[in-house]
Image (spheres, rainbow, N blue to C red):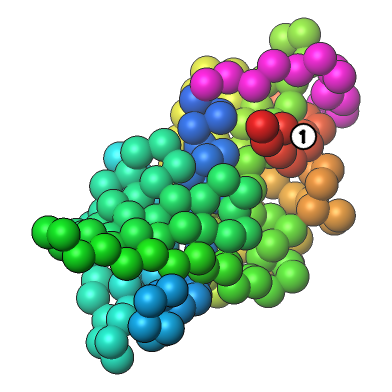
Amino acid sequence: MSAATTIPTGSQISPVDERIYQQTNLLGDWKGSWTKNHQPIEIKVDSINGSTAQVEYTHNGHTEKGTGTVDGRTITYGNVTIATRNGTQAAVEFAFGTATQSAILAKSAAPADQNKLVGNWIGSTATQTAAFQVISISGRDAQVRYSIDGQTAQGVGDASKNAVNLGKVAFSTADGLNGTVTFPVGHNTYTLAVKKFSPKTA
């Protein structure tokens, strides 16, 4: 038995989903140059888990890898802090004592199929809600987190073209804006329509 549903136009976004959206914006490969000395800088945010992020920081010809601290729209790694509002440009500041440097970085584009899948997907009906987050994709491995009817899970899913599977839960999208989440309830399987969550920016 399958139930196809649509999203009510007045769906409300929870503070948790808003926070996840902000974190998703930080993920990716950011590149640019320091404003003072014009030296290239690259920051890769590979994954985010709660208040920590796995970061690669490349400057002066060498790369450091480690764990950064996430706070809303910002990540601090050592003496470097990166922040973004829109997920396409980021501001970076380096501070050590009285010495400071700043830069504006641009996010490198991911492959088209990955761009379509990555994001926060949310849908609800009078009886069911689903939030499916594709955090990042590397090859066929997708970092996934979802909450369906109060049941949450996260892990590494299997990505192929326009679909991601994590256990018995599947998500797919054709246009990168609308999608479906398929999940089991008891002996039945349900399909819920979802939309990519893009909150209004101030």
Q: Nearer the viewer, residue 20 or 102?
A: 102
Q: Residue furthest bottom?
A: 61
The one nearer the camera, 66 or 121, is: 66
Is residue 117 toward the left or the right of residue 139 in the image? right
Which of the two residues, 180 or 34, is positioned nearer the viewer here? 34
> Percent from the top left, x then y, of residue 105?
51, 68
Q: Is residue 186 left or right of residue 53?
A: right
Camera sees residue 69: yes
The answer to whether any part of residue 41 appears in the image is no
Q: Is residue 202 magenta?
A: no
Q: Is residue 19 above or below residue 25?
A: above
Task: Tell me if residue 171 comes above or below residue 46 in the rendering.
Answer: above
Foreground: 128 or 2? 128
- Position of the C terminus by quadrant: top right
Would you place residue 111 above or below residue 115 in this image?
below
Query: Which residue is labeled 1 in the image?
Result: 194
> At 51% from the left edge and 58% from the top edge, which residue is drawn?
90
Q: Residue furthest top?
A: 126
Task: Tell whether position 2 is magenta.
Answer: yes
Q: Quadrant of residue 114?
A: bottom right
Most common secondary structure along the magenta stretch:
loop
Q: Is residue 193 left or right of residue 199?
A: right
Looking at the image, residue 39 sits to the left or right of residue 183; the answer is left
Q: Label 1 neighbourhood size at 10 Å, few (<14), some (14-19), many (20+)?
A: many
Q: Which SS class for mark 1?
A: strand
Residue most extreme to the left: 97
